[in-house]
Image: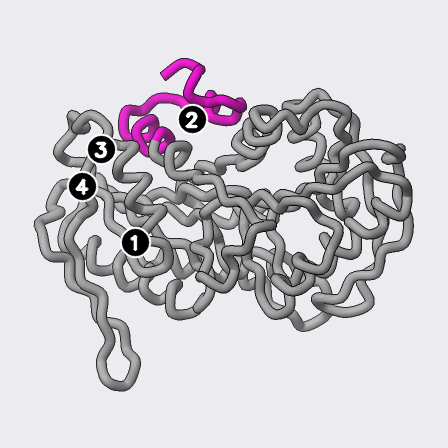
Amino acid sequence: MATQYFDPKLKIFALNSNKPLAEKIANEVGVELGKTSVDRFSDGEIRINIEQSVRGSHVYVIQSTSAPVNDNLMELLIMIDALRRASAATINVVIPYYGYARQDRKARSREPITAKLVANMLQTAGVTRVLALDLHAAQIQGFFDVPVDHLMGAPLLADYFINSGLAEDAVVVSPDHGGVTRARALAEFLKAPIAIIDKRRPKANVAEIMNIIGDVKGKRCIMIDDMIDTAGTITLGSQALMDAGAKEVYASCTHPVLSGPAIERIKNSPIKKLVVTDSIQLTADKQIDKIEQISVGPLIGQAIKRINENRPVSPLFKNRFRSHEQ
């Protein structure tokens, strides 16, 4: 553990979605994880008990709302309610992966905006602050009426590629037009140009690669996205880049959802390495040689300390964040 944190009122609790990440966050902050029990009634209802006093405490709850999405979301809502009724001074939820973020607007008539519904539920339960990582749509911050701190995974991914000697002669590739801002951020860290894959998506979770905008011939291509779900976009994109003359293709994302045929597609693709964070815990069947996971635990831990001490979080938006003002 890092040096014991000076403020006994700061407490960190982990629910079931990603306990290994929560341990890393607590270690970075310098506290022990709080004691809580999460179990089920025989009919599947979730029951939570906080096994220590939180009265007057500044509590941080670590919970990605990844699969099983609805169970993890309900755990979080119930925990918030328990903390509020236990007189916690502040209830800060740390959501490394925000489920339902793709439903951030009405793409068709009579569709819900479920990302906003989730925000409403969290606030109704009693949350006082949200700390998120690479939201699928940045405007989700505006769905809340409480403070939202939005961290970026790009600085960590950039450090990986720089430290691995892969930033030389590289071009950062966005898999679609919507990801250009994200690709530009990584490109600035790597001092590399960008390219864009122009694709058409005929239906959900099916992507068709159409055209590449930018020069990738003879280059090391580094694709970046906020999340990889079924891996159709990233694997078809990698093949299109190789067909366009790329020397080799790497891929990266913050959130490795990796559902359905994702692992098989990645195995059979020309991608040399997929670099992801641990915002979502990878099950054993997803831990393959082509996938390398880096931890956001130190980043989130530093953010929690800054928030608790009323210091700015913005220095963490730079790569090699440890080297900046603490």
Q: Disc 4 or disc 1, which is closer to the eye? A: 4
Write the residue at 27% across / 72% down. Answer: 46
Q: Disc 3 or disc 1, which is closer to the eye? A: 3
In the image, taking residue 265 as reference, residue 254 lies left or right, namely left
Residue 101, image quadrant: bottom right
CB contact under 8 Å: marks 3 and 4:
yes
Answer with mark 3 or mark 4, whichever residue precedes in sequence. 3
Q: Secondary structure at mark 2?
A: loop
Label 1: which residue? 126
CB contact under 8 Å: marks 4 and 1:
no
Label 2: which residue? 313
Q: Disc 2 or disc 3, which is closer to the eye? A: 3
Answer with mark 3 or mark 1, whichever residue precedes in sequence. 3
Q: Residue furthest bottom?
A: 43
Q: Residues within 10 Å of mark 3 (few under 14, many from 20)?
A: some
The answer to whether residue 90 is magenta is no
Answer with mark 2 or mark 3, whichever residue precedes in sequence. 3
In x, y percent, where is residue 270? Answer: 75, 51
- Per the rendered image, the range of residues in magenta is 302-326
Label 3: which residue? 1
Q: Disc 2 or disc 4, which is closer to the eye? A: 4
Q: Residues within 10 Å of mark 2 (few under 14, many from 20)?
A: some
Answer with mark 2 or mark 1, whichever residue precedes in sequence. 1
CA distance for labels 2 and 4 = 23 Å
In x, y percent, where is residue 22? Answer: 31, 46
CA distance for labels 3 and 1 = 30 Å
Amino acid type of the residue tagged 4 in the rendering: Glu
Amino acid type of the residue tagged 2 in the rendering: Val
